[in-house]
Image (spheres, rainbow, N blue to C red):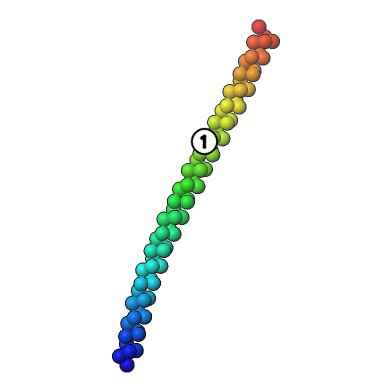
Amino acid sequence: MLQNKMLLTENMRLRLENDKLNIEKMQKMRLKVTRLEEKINLYKAKMSRNNKEIVAYKLLIVLWMMFLNYLVCGW
């Protein structure tokens, strides 16, 4: 009888430890997911900025070509 109670007590203690470990794992996973989401958002913002810069440079090149063409042909 006493041995049975000791085993039950040990079982409860192990369950509590397991629960604590699971909570810690979940917190670590949540932090990791949050960090990954932040990295993805930063990457998307960077790519958007790069695309806008590329469009601006292309527009600048076209304007220069038009201006030079105007100088050669128009004046």
Task: Determine whether, in the image, residue 65 is placed left or right of residue 28.
Answer: right
Residue at the spot 35% in from the left edge and 74% down from the top edge = 16
Quarter of the rendering containing residue 10: bottom left
Number of other residues with Cα within 10 Å of mark 1, as a class: few under 14, some 14 to 19, many 20 or more? few
Q: Quadrant of the N terminus?
A: bottom left
Residue at the spot 64% in from the left edge and 10% down from the top edge = 71
Quarter of the rendering containing residue 12: bottom left
Q: Quadrant of the C terminus?
A: top right
> Which is more toward the observer, 35 or 64?
35
Residue at the spot 69% in from the left edge and 10% down from the top edge = 73
Q: Identify residue type, mark 1.
A: Arg
User: Where 60 falls versus 16 (above or below)?
Assistant: above
The x and y percentages for residue 27 are 40, 60
The x and y percentages for residue 29 are 44, 59
User: Where 10 falls versus 69 (above or below)?
Assistant: below
Residue at the spot 52% in from the left edge and 43% down from the top edge = 44
The x and y percentages for residue 51 are 56, 35
> Which is more toward the observer, 15 or 52?
15
> Which is more toward the observer, 12 or 44?
12
How many numbered marks does the figure carry? 1
The residue where tag 1 is placed is 49
List the single residue furthest toward the top: 75
Task: Determine whether, in the image, residue 63 is placed left or right of residue 7.
Answer: right
List the single residue furthest toward the front: 3
Quarter of the rendering containing residue 69: top right
The x and y percentages for residue 39 are 47, 47
List the single residue furthest toward the left: 2
Q: Secondary structure at mark 1?
A: helix
User: Where 32 falls versus 45 (above or below)?
Assistant: below
